[in-house]
Amino acid sequence: MPNYITEDFILLSYSMLMDDTVTQLEETTLLPGFNRLVQGLIKQSRATLEEIKDKDSENAAIHRANLDYFSVLSALLSGKENAPDGVDKKAVAAELQQILEAKTVALSELMHQKIDYTQFQPRGKYTQSKELKQYFRAMRYAGTVLFPVLESQATGISDVVADRMTQQVMAMNTLLQADKGLLEAYQQLTDQLSWLFGPPDDLTLADYDKTGSSNAEITTSKLRHALLEYARKNGAQPAIIGGIVDANLLKKEKKTAVDVLTGFRFMPQRFTPDSAAFQELVYDRVQTCKDSGTSFSTALIQGKRVKGYPLGLELMAALGSKEAGDRLEKSGDQNYEGYPQAYKRALEQLAKPAGLASEHLNFMAYWLTRGALLPSEVDDNRRLNTALALWTRCRHASVLYTKQSYTASGKGFSMSPQRQGAWLEPIPEFYLLLGRKVRTFTANLFPENTPETKPQIAAMKAFADILDTCSDIAWREIKTGVCNPEDTEFLNKLDKRLLKLTGKSDQPVVVDVHSEPTSGLVLEEGLGHPVIVTREIKGSKVPARGGLFNYYEFKHPMDDRLTNEKWQAMLKDKSAMKALKRSPGSTKQ
C-alpha cells in the first residue's frame, strides 16, 4: 500500500525529534547543571552561616530560610523524602510530603504562601524515568515558589513575610556574585531555558541588583516598593497570573493580581504568548455572561457566571483561522462583558517575541492563513485541526517550563485574611502531662519501629512535640500576659497541622452506655457540633475564637440504638432535638 505522507505526519515527526533533542539536553546538561548549582548554593549557605557570629541575628535567619529552600530542591533532585541539609526539618519534611503527594492546593508552612501542589505531579515525558520525575518536581518547584515584593491578603503574604523573602533574594544574589563559577552556571542555565521556552515572566536577579545597588541604604520595605515601581516602568511584571489569587480580596485592597504576583522565582517559569493571551481571556479580565451561561468556558465564581476557561479555538482564531472564528461565534464562548477589549489585549500578547514558542505560533499562523492559498486540497477545517495538534504537542513538550494561566479565584476558594493575634489557654502542666501520656502510649503500643508502624509513631511523636511547644507558650503567656508574634504564628497554624496529623475532620459521635430493658430505653452519650467561644486579646480588633465540646446525655429507644450517621442527621432535625430529653449533665445551651 503506498504511503500518504500528510502534513500532520511531518509535523508529528518534527515535534518528536524536537522533544527527543530537548530531553537529551535535559539529561546531559540541564539536570546536572541544576543539581551542581543547588549543591553549590547549599555549600555556600552553610559556610555563610558558620561565619555569622550572632546565630540569632536577622541575617542568620535569612540564610537559614534559604538553606531550607535549597534543601527542598536538593531532596527533590535526589529523590529523597528527607532533606538532611535543612534547618527547620519539620517544615521541610512537611513541604516535601505535600510536593510528593501532589494532591491539594494548600498553605506552605515553609514558604508562607498558597501553593498548587497538584502541579508537581510528573506528567508528559517526565514519567519515563526516575531521574526525569525528580528533575520535573525540582524544576517545577523552583519555578513556582514566589518571592513577592508586595504584601496582600489576596495571596496571604504579610508585610513581614514579604520583607523576609525579599531579603532572601538579595542573599541569594550575594552568594552567586561571590562565586564566579556558580554565577556562570546560573546564567547559562537561565539563558538556555530562555531561548528554548521563552523569557522569564518575573523579576530577575539582575533587576534586584540594579534596584538594590542604587538604594543601598533604604529599608527592605522601601526596597520592595522600589522594585515594584521598577517592574512597572520596565515591563518586568508578570503577564500571566500563574498562581492563587483571591479576586474578591484584591478589590477590597484596591490592588491588582499583576502587582501582588510581582517578584522573583529562582527558576522562573517562562512567558509564552499563548499563555499570556489565555490570561487575558478569562476572569477577571473578562467578566459575566450576557446569556444563560451554559457555554463550555463558563464557571461559577463569587455567585456569578463568568468566563473561567480559555479555548484553543480562541488562540487559533487570533492566529487567523476563519474556521475557528466561525465556530466560536456559534458556541457563545465570546458572549461576555468585556470580551472585545480582552480579545484585543490577547492579540497584543501574541505579537510579543518569545523565542521558540513565538516561532511555533508564527508557523501556525502561516499555515492557517497563507496555507489556504497553496495548491492543496487541504481545507480550513483540516488546517485548524493540524494547528491545534501542533500547539498541543508544543505545550506537551514545554509543560515543565511554561507558566500556566490561572483564573482568578473567588469566594469558592478564598484566602483567609491575616489573623491578628492568638491565644492558648495557659495551662502548661496540662500539656506536659498529656505529652507524657502520648509518649507512654506510643512506647507501649509500638515497642518496635518497623516500616508498618513508622507512620503512626511519627504522627504521635509530632503530636507530643506540639504539646511541648504548647506548654512553653503557656508559661510565656502566664509571665507576660500576651502572646508573642512567633507563638501567635504557631497557634494560628496549629489547626491545619493537627488536621494533617489526624488525616480527617472530626464529626459528631454517639454511643449507648447502659440499657434498661423494662422501659425499653438506653442511655446515650453524644458529642454534637462544638460550642463556639471567644476571648478578647490585646492588640487585636476582633476576639480570638475557639470551640468547646458540646456534650449530650439522653435516653433513647433500645430498638433504635443510634449510629453516628443517625445522630448526625438527628442534630440537623430541629424538631427531633427539641424533643430530646437531656440529662442535667449535658452542656448548657
Image (cartoon, helix red, strand yellow):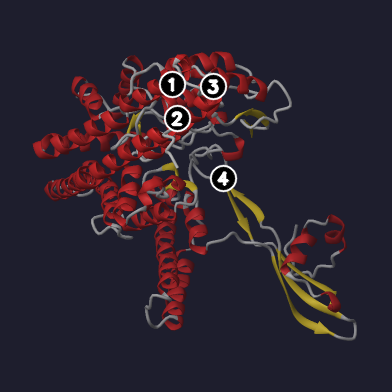
Q: Is residue 448 left or right of residue 60?
A: right
> How far apart are the two marked residues, 2 and 4, measured between alpha carbons?
39 Å
> How far apart are the two marked residues, 3 and 4, measured between alpha carbons?
69 Å
> How far apart are the two marked residues, 1 and 4, measured between alpha carbons?
68 Å
In the rendered image, residue 182, in percent from the top left (x then y), is placed at 14, 39
User: Callout 4: helix, strand or loop?
Assistant: loop
User: Callout 3: helix, strand or loop?
Assistant: helix
**Tags 3 and 2 in contact by the CB under 8 Å rule?**
no
User: Callout 1: helix, strand or loop?
Assistant: helix
Residue at mark 4: 536
> How far apart are the two marked residues, 3 and 2, measured between alpha carbons?
33 Å
Q: Is residue 543 left or right of residue 452?
A: right
Q: Nearer the viewer, mark 1 or mark 4?
A: 1
Residue at mark 1: 367
Say which quadrant the C terminus sits in: bottom right
Which numbered dot is residue 241?
Answer: 2
First in sequence, mark 3 or 1: give its number. 1
**Tags 2 and 1 in contact by the CB under 8 Å rule?**
no
Give, as a three-letter code, the residue at label 1: Trp
* Residue 158 can be seen, yes or no: no
Residue at mark 3: 380
Q: Nearer the viewer, mark 2 or mark 4?
A: 2
Looking at the image, which is closer to me, 16 or 339? 16
